[in-house]
Image: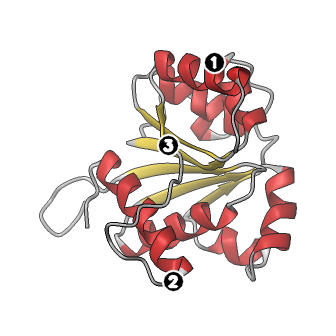
Amino acid sequence: MDSQGDPLKRIIVGISGASGAIYGIRLLEVLRDLGVETHLVITDPAKRIIQTETTFSLQEVIDLSDHYYHVDDVGAPIASGTFPVDGMVVAPCSIKTLSAIAHCYATNLLVRAADVTLKERRKLLLLVRESPLHKGHLDLMLKATELGAIIVPPVVSFYNHPKTLDDVIDDVIRRILRLLGLDQ
């Protein structure tokens, strides 16, 4: 419970193997600062991308979360609809992960948690990171949307006059927070 007696939010964060792992990392930082309980799953390709694209160690990313689960731990609490969460964000979402989610092909915990999020009619936000897109990618996004997911491509907006890469990243994070009902 927070200081007003309202239940704290609980969000699952998945980081999959697309460029842009910093989006998931920054989301974890902001959710921590907001007092939101986070449950983290990182795919093996994402671990390599974190190492390649950021200055964070894997342990530093894990330490940003309240609970971390290995991607193969399909018995983790977040694999069950009886575990209450307020939503899930996959940031970034690779096309491979999008395809698995769109086809309910739960080969790992990240995809299983996303499938559970959809079946329980909870918010699932997918930061699909691919460009350019072909029809197959677009079909997968449409299929995921029809299942209830919200596609949130991390598109740069310029009306806020971003001056740094952090400004661009934070603008995307603000959009995610709005969609989760966690406006700052």
Q: Residue at x 68, y 71 (%)?
A: 61
Judging by the rendered image, the residue that carries numbered circle 2 is: 164
Q: Residues within 10 Å of mark 1 (few under 14, many from 20)?
A: few
Q: Residues within 10 Å of mark 2 (few under 14, many from 20)?
A: few
Relative vertical location of residue 127 with respect to residue 8 in this rendering, above or below: above
Q: Residue at x 41, y 66 (%)?
A: 171
Secondary structure state at the residue bearing disc 3? strand
Give the mark nearer the N terminus: 3 vs 2.
Answer: 3
Residue 123 in the figure: left or right of residue 68: left
Q: Residues within 10 Å of mark 3 (few under 14, many from 20)?
A: many
Q: Position of residue 85 (x, y in %)?
A: 42, 41
Q: CA distance from mark 3 to mark 2?
A: 27 Å
Secondary structure state at the residue bearing disc 2? loop
Q: CA distance from mark 3 to mark 1?
A: 21 Å
Q: CA distance from mark 2 to mark 1?
A: 33 Å
Amino acid type of the residue tagged 2 in the rendering: Thr
Residue 7 in the figure: left or right of residue 112: left
Residue 65 in the figure: left or right of residue 106: left
User: Splitting the image into 4 quarters, where does residue 71 fall?
Assistant: top right
Residue 16 in the figure: left or right of residue 143: right
Give the mark nearer the N terminus: 3 vs 1.
Answer: 3
Q: Is the Cβ of the residue at disc 3 closer than 8 Å to that at disc 1?
A: no
Q: Position of residue 150 (x, y in %)?
A: 45, 33
Judging by the rendered image, the residue that carries numbered circle 1 is: 139
Secondary structure state at the residue bearing disc 1? helix
Relative vertical location of residue 93 with respect to residue 42 in this rendering, above or below: above
Amino acid type of the residue tagged 1 in the rendering: Asp
Q: Position of residue 116 (x, y in %)?
A: 55, 26
Outermost residue, left side: 4
- The numbered dot on residue 88 is 3
Amino acid type of the residue tagged 3 in the rendering: Met
Q: Which quadrant of the figure contains the N terminus?
A: bottom left
